[in-house]
Image: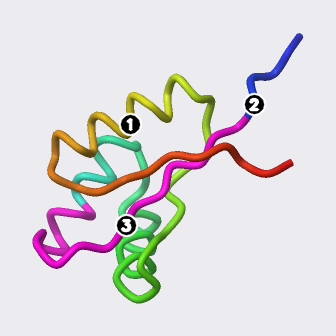
Amino acid sequence: MHRLPPWKVLLHNDAVNDMDYVVESIVRLARATVPNATRCMVEAHRKGVSLITVTHREHAELLNEQFRSARLKVTIEPEAR
């Protein structure tokens, strides 16, 4: 069985959205637990960017669109091997 190459989904900090909204969006869209979503939000807030998940490209692109629709900045990139 061939595994699809992994892609990173990265959350970027913004000065617009409320922290609770960001956590709720990560839980809803990326199916993260509240503690993991909170960690992502805090890391993005402090460092400017945080890894939400690693998945295959098609799912990463879908998440990118969904986060954009939720007014959150997310980028995707291939994971270095």
Residue type, label 1: Leu
In this rendering, position of residue 24 left or right of residue 30: left
Q: Which sits in the foreground, 44 or 78?
A: 78
Q: Position of residue 56 (x, y in %)?
A: 62, 29
Quote the CA–CA distance across marks 1 and 2. 16 Å
Residue of label 3: 12
Q: Name the residue under label 2.
A: 5
Q: Look at the numbered disc 3 and give the secondary structure of its residue.
A: strand
Give percent across and percent down for residue 43: 45, 80
Assign a secondary structure to mark 2.
loop
Rendered view: 72 above or below 46: above
**Region of the chain picked out in magenta, as a range:** 6-23
Residue 11 drawn in magenta: yes
Q: Which image quadrant: the N terminus? A: top right
Label 2 sits on what residue type? Pro
Mark 2 to mark 3: distance in Å?
23 Å
Label number found at residue 16: none
Q: How far apart are marks 1 and 3 (CA)?
A: 14 Å
Residue 76 colored magenta?
A: no
Q: Name the residue under label 1.
A: 63
SS at badge 1: helix
